[in-house]
Amino acid sequence: MAAHTTVKGKRITGEARIKMAADLKKKYEKGASIRALAEATDRSYGFVHRILTESGVVLRGRGGATRTKTKTP
């Protein structure tokens, strides 16, 4: 993933925000995690999450093993 050249914590507005949102949306839809996108862009998890939801992305469920109840006969 190519990292953006933004300053950490600097407010992103206007055209730069629209471009970043489109880029993050494309990468997320190709399978990148929010955490990976946050690290690659030097932004927080919350920022990336907010940008994706503002862009209309349907977020995936959380990963990991799911627990199933053991059926007893």
Image (cartoon, rainbow, N blue to C red):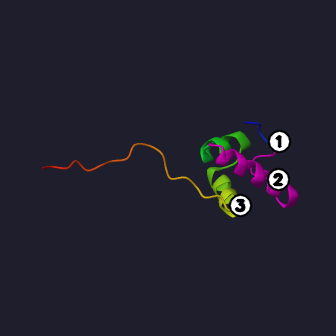
Instruction: Decide which of tag 2 and tag 3 comes sooner along the chain.
Output: 2
Q: Residue at x 40, y 43 (%)?
A: 65
Inspect the magenta stretch and tell me whether residue 15 lies in it. yes
| Range drawn in magenta | 6-31
Q: Nearer the viewer, mark 2 or mark 1?
A: 2
Q: Residue at x 60, y 58 (%)?
A: 58
Q: Secondary structure at mark 3?
A: loop
- Disc 2 marks a residue whose amino acid type is Lys
Viewer-closest of 2 and 56: 56
CA gap, disc 3 and disc 1: 21 Å
Which dot marks residue 59?
none
Circle 2 sits on which residue? 19
Inspect the magenta stretch and tell me whether residue 73 lies in it. no
Label 1 crowd bin: few (<14), some (14–19), many (20+), radius 10 Å: few
Does any portion of residue 12 appear in the rendered image?
no
- Disc 3 marks a residue whose amino acid type is Ser
CA gap, disc 2 and disc 1: 13 Å
Whether residue 40 is situated above or below residue 22 in the rendered picture: above
Circle 1 sits on which residue? 5
CA gap, disc 2 and disc 3: 11 Å
Which residue ends up furthest to the front in the rendered image?
73
Q: Nearer the viewer, mark 3 or mark 1?
A: 3
Instruction: Decide which of tag 2 and tag 1 comes sooner along the chain.
Output: 1
- CB of mark 2 within 8 Å of CB of mark 3? no
Circle 3 sits on which residue? 55
Q: Residue at x 44, y 43 (%)?
A: 64
